[in-house]
Amino acid sequence: MRIINRKPSRVTSIYLAMIPFIAVIVTYAIASHYRLAANPADKLLPSLQSMGASFWRMAFEADKRSGNYLLWLDTWDSLARLGMGMAIATSLALTIGLLIGFIPHVRSTLAPFVATFSLIPPITILPILFIVFGLGEAAKVALIVVGTAPVMIRSTAQNVMNIPREMIIKAETLGASVWQMLTRLVLPQTLPGLINSMRLALVPAWIFLISAEAIASTTGLGYRIFLVRRYLAMDVILPYVIWITLLAFVIDRLLLMLSRRAFPWSHMGGESI
Amino acid sequence: MSAPDTKVPPHVVVRNVSKSYGDMVVLERVNLEIAPNTFCTIVGASGCGKSTFLRMLLSQELPTSGDILIDGNPLPPEPTPDRGIVFQRYSVFSHLTVEDNLLLAAEFEAAPATGKLFGSARKKALESIEPTLEKIGLSPARRRFPSQLSGGMQQRLAIAQALLKKPKILLLDEPFGALDPGIRADMHELLDQLWEELGMTIFMVTHDINEAFKLGTRMLVFDKIRHDPHAPERFGATITYDLPLTRNLKDSAPTASELFTAPKNPLSEDIKT
C-alpha cells in the first residue's frame, strides 16, 4: 500500500509521537554526561538530576531572602500579564474586527489604519510604552496588546467577510435587524475563528511577555530566566523553558477543547491540529 | 389560470430592466407581468443572467436601469421579509440546529435586543414550529446541525425556513441542483403542495428543463438574441420565450431543443453582416 494511505493506529501514534522527545532527551543526557566527566564544574549542560533538583528548589522551597515560592510566583505573575493582554486583545478583535468585517463604512474607515498599525514592529514601541505607562504592569500588558491585537482584528474581520453572503441575505429576509444579525449570525459564526486566532496569537504574546519581563520587571518567568543568566545557571533556565513550553501547550489545548465543546458544528469537517 | 389575466392586476411588473457590470451587459430590455399565484420557472444557458434576474427580484442586486414593481410599488433597495429565498447552498445557518433554524424568524420578531427567546417563550415558540417539523419530516433530526443532514433534508429545512415569514413571493435559485433525481421528485411534491396551500408567487431558476415544465405554470426562457462576434459582452440576454403552461396539457409544450434555438431576429442578422 502507498505510504499516504497507511494510517497509524492510536497506540502506534502515541509511540511515534514519543520518539523525537525521547531522542532529544537521550542525546542531551549523553552529551551532558561526557562534558561533566571531563569537567565536573561545567555549567553549560547540567545533568538531568541537577536540573530536577533546581526545579524542585524553585517550586517547593521558599526563597531564603523573600520567603516566596519563586516558580509559582513567577508563573502566576506571568500568566496574569498574559491573560490580561490576551483578554484586551480579544475584546478589541471582537468589537473592531466584527464591525470592520460587517459594516462597509467602518471597513473603509478603519481597515487601512489597522493594516498599517499591524506592520509596526511591536518591540520598537516598548520604549514608548515604558515612558508612557512607567515600568509597571501596564506597559507589559500594553506590549502584548500592541503585538497581538492588530493581527487578531484583521483575521476576525476576514472571518466575518468569509461568512457566506447567502446566510446574511437569508437573515435579512427573516426580518433581522443589523444588531440581531450581529448577535445571532455574525458573532456565533466568527467565534470558532476567534479562538483559532487566539491560539495563533499566543505565540507572539509569549514572546512579548518574556521580552518585557526581561527588560524591566521584578517577577515573572522571563525575568527569572534573564536574572539567573548572569550566573550561567543553565540548571534553572532549561527547566524554566520547558515549564513555559508546557504552559503554552496546555493553554493551546484548553482553547482547542473549548472550541470543540462550545462549537461542535464547526469541527465536523475533518481532522485538525 | 397561469397566463397573464387582464382582469387581475399583475402582482409583479418588470419594466425595461437591464443589468450590466461595467462594459459587460448581462440582461437588457426585460419586460414582464406576472399574475398573483403564478409558479414561474426560469431556464436558460449558463451565464445567461437568469440568476442575476432572480437576485434583482430579491434586491440583492439593483437593476442598472428599469423598474421592478410589486403590487404597484417599487422594490425596496434591500432584501426584506416579503420575499423569501432558497439558494442552492448555504441557505440555512450552519451554527444552529434544525430547531433553532426554524425558531430564528420568531426570535427576531419577539426579541429585538437579544434576538433569542428563553424559558417559556422559547417553549411556546418550539411548539409552534412542531407542525412544520412534522411536515418536512425533520422531527427526528430536530437537534442536528445542518452539516449532519443530507442534501435533501437541508433543502427541505431551507424551504420551510424561507416560508416562516409567509412571503408573498418565494424565490428559488437552483434549489435542487445538487440533489439526486429521486430526492428531487420528493422535493417537487413538497414544493407543489406548499405552493397550492399558501397561494404565493414562486420564481424558480433551474437548469433542469423537465423540472421547469413539471412545476411551472409559466416558463421564461432567457437567451441572447443579439450577438456581436467581435464584442460578445456588448449585448445581454432577455426573455426569448414566455410560455404559459397548463399543467395537464404538457404534451403540447415545445421541446427543449426547439426552445434553445434562438429565434431569427433581424437585428442579429444586421450585426453579423
Image: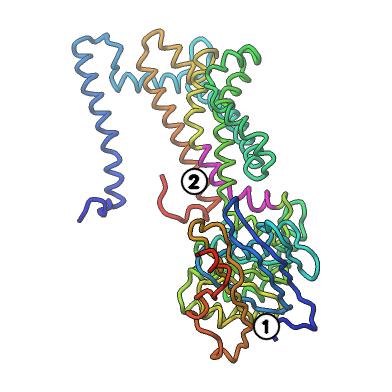
Disc 2 with disc 1 on a shared chain: no
**Residue at mark 2: chain:** A
Task: Name the chief secondary structure element in magenta.
Answer: helix
Label 2 with label 1: CB-CB less than 8 Å: no
In what quadrant of the picture does the N terminus of chain A appear? bottom left
Provide the residue span drawn in magenta.
A181-198
Q: Is residue B45 left or right of residue A242?
A: right
Local crowd size for mark 2, using a 10 Å CA cut-off: few (<14), some (14–19), many (≥20): few
Q: Quadrant of residue B202?
A: bottom right
| Residue, disc 1 | B196
Q: Where residue A219 appears, x then y in whole percent?
A: 53, 17
Q: Amino acid at mark 1?
A: Glu
Mark nearest the camera among 2 and 1 is 1
Is A113 or B118 nearer to us in this picture? A113
Alpha carbon distance from label 2 to label 1 = 48 Å
Q: Where residue A230 appears, x then y in whole percent?
A: 41, 8
Is B258 or B218 nearer to us in this picture? B258
Q: Secondary structure at mark 1?
A: helix
| Residue, disc 2 | A257
